[in-house]
Amino acid sequence: MNILMVGDVFGEPGRAALAKHLPRLRHEHAIDFCVVNIENAASGFGVTPAMARQALEQGADVLTSGNHIWDRKEIIEYIVKENLLLRPANYPTGAPGVGSVVVKAGTYQVGVLNVQGRVFLPSIDCPFVRADEEVARMRAATPLIVVDMHAEATSEKQAMGWYLDGRVSAVVGTHSHVQTADERILPGGTAYVTDLGLTGPIDSVIGVEKELAIQRFLTGMPNRFEPAKGRARLQGAVIRIDAETGRASGIERLQRDLPA
């Protein structure tokens, strides 16, 4: 089974890159299942119901998110009704929506888990404890489980990869918007990469207009971040998995540019 996981979609440039490349990538790589992190789709902060629906129509099977999931209040009603848009599973009990889902993919089922780190991010419930609970529940239905670990700290993402090695098919990081070159198959058969990267504007500071980001670093003054314009790129990874055992056999980083 071939699973495509797409890094954080950022603003209109990211949505355009996803629309252009996702159908092609599904064909080129014979993709059976696709997960897209969508939390920055609305001008870099949150996602609207229309944007979530559009991504699903374009070929995403499940959408993941992170710390910006609540930035657009209109998403709350949608996420309650639509379990294909996940929020991090380790939000406290009572938060709207769900953090994991098992979805049919041909003759198989794929489990998707979304958790959020706590280092340099709001301190919510423990992602490791919640991952234990969710993975145990999903493994009763399928050995095919992929995890989006939305976290700031490289160490926390790596720790989650090792922690879940042999229990899930893949652990991929999101949030930093910078693709890392450390993709590998861990000893227990879990595919891992610290960050999938950014689906959004190339000439930017993690998606933001570079002049705005530089100004904040120079002055220390708050300003309003806006998505950069110009060329866009889709980043992510294709993961090859034995559908019977759930063990990964390969992981390939990918990038696709969209001209300005």
Image: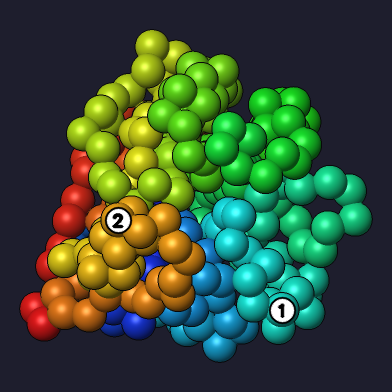
Residue under label 2:
218
* Horizontal and vertical percent position of residue 186: 37, 18
**Which of label 1 and label 2 is nearer to you?**
2
The answer to whether one can see residue 152 in this image is yes
Q: Nearer the viewer, residue 51 or 151?
A: 151
Decide: is 36 above or below 123.
below
Q: Nearer the viewer, residue 67 or 106?
A: 67
- Of callouts 1 and 2, the N-terminal one: 1
Is 4 placed left or right of 232 in the picture? right
The answer to whether one can see residue 8 in this image is no
- The quarter of the rendered structure image containing the N terminus is top left
Decide: is 4 above or below 167.
below
The residue shown at (56%, 38%) is: 120
Under mark 2, the amino acid is Leu
Neighbor class of circle 2 (other Cα within 10 Å; few <14, some 14-19, many 20+) is few
CA gap between label 1 and label 2 equals 32 Å
* Horizontal and vertical percent position of residue 19: 31, 80
Neighbor class of circle 1 (other Cα within 10 Å; few <14, some 14-19, many 20+) is few
* Horizontal and vertical percent position of residue 79: 72, 71
The residue most toward the front is 219
Residue under label 1:
73
The residue shown at (30%, 56%) is: 218
